[in-house]
């Protein structure tokens, strides 16, 4: 079982409002809980995107397990934690379940060759998901999820996210300067703001700097993907790029309380590129 948290971009405006982008990897079975936090802008890898046998290989190499297992009692939280030897036995049964499921789906695949958007869905309980999340608002998420009453797996995820953010170093941005996940410094020096925002959006849609096949991106391909997303109305990848809503130096304000509740979409103090579009 894998839980990974990687800082992609961390920015602060002159009013002190911080904007962070994280790349996450965690068991897909907690994704519905993560999705309940509406202050997050996010994109996630889709089980429809990869070929069936690539998912099978991932499961064989890194099967998704829960962080901990507790005995069943009434209520949302479990009772006594299973001993290590008991937990290891449960994990073996989960491995048997995954193997049997894969064997049955391979038979379906060989007989009928259904599209991956159908057959991959039945692998989801055993897989991990890659997610990019950008937000100015983390407090409530950590209050609920970095807590002993939370599901142990999402608790472990929240704890790692909190640790990464607490050790992160921000870049100070003024209005007109942009928070651009997955955009390299040499690219920022070559292209216009619009091009950079679209490059970032394409990579956020992939939840990766790299292409799906692992190769380095081609700018023309990124721009074509961004164009396709916009024309189809898939606008969530354009929420991760942002510029400060106000600038203390440019606007000459001194009383922070006057400005602290200015929002753009779900960001406080930052204008999302989606809203610019």
Image (tube, helix red, strand yellow):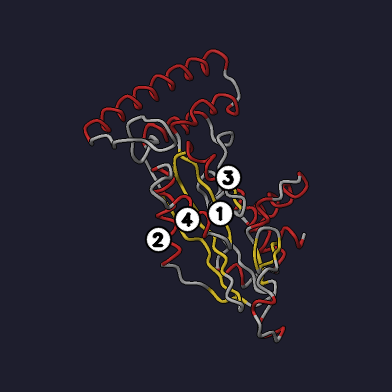
Please name which of the two marks, 2 or 4, marks the residue nearer to the observer.
4
Please name which of the two marks, 2 or 1, marks the residue nearer to the observer.
2
Classify the position of the N terminus by image quarter: top left
Spot the residue most to the left.
85
Direction from residue 207 to residue 106 in the image, left or right: left
Q: Secondary structure at mark 1?
A: strand
Residue 272 percent across, percent down from the top left:
69, 62
Q: Secondary structure at mark 2?
A: helix
Residue appearing at x 67%, y 62% in the figure: 197
Residue appearing at x 78%, y 47% in the figure: 231
Q: Residue under circle 2?
A: 163
Q: Secondary structure at mark 4?
A: helix
The tag earlier along the polypeptide, 2 or 4, is: 4
The tag earlier along the polypeptide, 3 or 1, is: 3
Please name which of the two marks, 4 or 1, marks the residue nearer to the observer.
4
The answer for how far apart the CA atoms under marks 3 and 1 are is 13 Å
Q: Residue under circle 3?
A: 36
Label 2–label 3 contact, CB within 8 A? no
As drawn, the label of residue 142 is: 4
Front-most of residues 112 and 77: 77
Please name which of the two marks, 3 or 1, marks the residue nearer to the observer.
3
Residue 191 percent across, percent down from the top left:
67, 68
Direction from residue 214 to residue 237 in the image, left or right: right
The answer for how far apart the CA atoms under marks 4 and 1 are is 14 Å
């Amino acid at each position: 079982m894998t839980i990974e948290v990687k800082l992609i971009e961390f920015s602060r405006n002159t009013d002190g409002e911080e904007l962070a982008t994280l790349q996450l990897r965690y068991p897909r079975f907690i994704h519905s809980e993560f999705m309940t936090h509406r202050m997050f802008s996010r994109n996630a890898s889709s089980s429809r995107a990869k070929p069936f046998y690539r998912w099978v290989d991932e499961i064989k190499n890194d099967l998704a397990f829960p962080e901990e297992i507790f005995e069943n009692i009434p209520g949302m939280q479990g009772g006594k934690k299973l001993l290590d030897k008991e937990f290891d036995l449960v994990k073996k049964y989960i491995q048997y379940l995954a193997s049997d499921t894969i064997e049955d789906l391979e038979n379906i695949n060989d007989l009928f060759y259904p599209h991956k958007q159908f057959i991959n869905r039945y692998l989801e309980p055993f897989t991990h998901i890659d997610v990019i999340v950008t937000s100015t608002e983390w407090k409530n998420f950590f209050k609920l999820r970095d807590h002993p009453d939370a599901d142990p797996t999402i608790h472990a995820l929240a704890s790692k996210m909190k640790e990464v953010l607490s050790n992160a170093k921000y870049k100070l941005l003024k209005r007109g300067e942009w928070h651009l996940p997955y955009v390299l410094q040499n690219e920022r020096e070559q292209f216009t703001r619009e091009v950079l925002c679209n490059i970032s959006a394409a990579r956020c849609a992939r939840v990766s700097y790299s292409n799906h096949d692992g190769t380095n991106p081609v700018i023309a391909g990124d721009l074509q993907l961004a164009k396709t997303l916009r024309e189809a109305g898939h606008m969530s990848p354009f929420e991760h790029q942002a510029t400060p809503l106000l600038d203390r130096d440019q606007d000459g304000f001194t009383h922070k309380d006057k400005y602290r509740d200015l929002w753009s979409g779900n960001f406080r103090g930052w204008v999302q590129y989606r809203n610019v579009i």
